[in-house]
Image: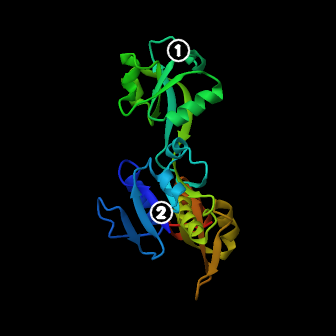
Amino acid sequence: MRIAVPNKGRLHEPSEELLERAGLHLVDGADRQLHADTVDPDVTVLYARAADIPEYVADGAADVGITGLDQVRESDADELVELRDLEFGRCRLVLAAPEDSDIETVYDFEGGRIATEFPTITRRYFDRVDVDVDVTEVSGATELTPHVDIADGIVDITSTGTTLRMNRLAVVDEVLESSVRLFAREDTADDEKVQQVDTALGSVLAAEDKRYLMMNAPEDVLDDVKDVLPGMGGPTVMDIAGSDRLAVHAVVEERAVFETISSLKDVGASDILVTEIERLVE
């Protein structure tokens, strides 16, 4: 099975890191290589431009792909199925206009010109809101186009809005909220290996911001310990050989660890150990 991942840019390293954490360790994946094997002999990683990955998957060059939702929507690859939101690379495609213009809503663009690197997404957006505009595809420096009379507004990616503010542009509407997703073709989405990879990546995401708590507690305070623990489905309780105490294990949210430990000590738990979780299969 072939997984297409971004070959460079801000999505490259997080994608590789996620695969590594999921147990798909890369073998001989040196810079500028077009592909790399993994420790699973049935799984190979292909490197491609983030914008080209939807086409790789749609054409069968790869079985699944890791890239932004914006790239999939722009490719117009309707045969692709989204398997999972991988929860990184978050950004927004927004419609923006100069701060000193009279444009306040999308309807003020009627008959106007829009510059963008995402013409497919942009045309679909304006068709949806029933506003007639002339969409011009540009490559780079999109924010400058309204200031040199090339366009009345732009549709562009923003993460924090800093670049828009620096170029005296104000957001008029949100066109698309995007993040990196795992995609497959409809005819391969249910394949066993594809599902295995999906589960492995999901197990990494499920483990984020969670911690594993282990402790000892007298049997007569077990109910109090259970009341304190905000665990998943209740704690695991085990006898300790040669002791009248019990071992209690639970998974808790990281943000709750500090308060939980204090409460556990108050009800009589001791020897409390907190560890990180690499993967969690739910």
Image location of residue 159, percent across then percent down: 45, 37
How many other residues sit within 10 Å of disc 2, few (<14), some (14-19) or many (≥20)? many
> Position of 225 compared to 1: left or right?
right
| Residue located at (57% from left, 58% from top) | 184
Compared to 68, does 264 lie above or below?
below
- The residue sitting at the front extreme is 59
- Point out which mark residue 7 bears: none
Residue positioned 69% across, 73% down in the render:
220
Q: CA distance from mark 1 to mark 2?
A: 44 Å
Quadrant in the rendering for residue 83: bottom right
Q: Secondary structure at mark 1?
A: loop
Report if residue 20 is visible in the image.
no
Give the class, few, some or many, for how many residues have Cα within 10 Å of label 1's Cα (few <14, many ≥20): some
Q: What residue lies at 58% left-to-right and 18% top-to-bottom?
A: 105
Q: Which residue position is annotated with label 1?
A: 103
Specify the farthest residue to the right.
Answer: 223
| Above or below, comparing residue 50 to residue 165 in the picture | below
Q: Secondary structure at mark 2?
A: strand
Q: Pick whichever of labels 1 and 2 is earlier in the sequence.
A: 2
Q: Residue furthest bottom?
A: 242
Q: x, y percentage for residue 165?
A: 40, 24
Say if 179 sits above or below 224 in the image: above
Residue 133 horizontal side relative to residue 233, left or right: left
Image quadrant containing the C terminus: bottom right
Which residue is the site of mark 2?
A: 3
Of the pair 230 and 74, the residue shown nearer to us: 74
Residue 185: in sight, yes or no? yes
Q: Quadrant of residue 197?
A: bottom right
What's under tag 1, amino acid-wise? Ile
List x then y, in percent, for residue 242.
Answer: 58, 88
Residue lying farthest left? 31
Q: Amino acid at mark 2?
A: Ile
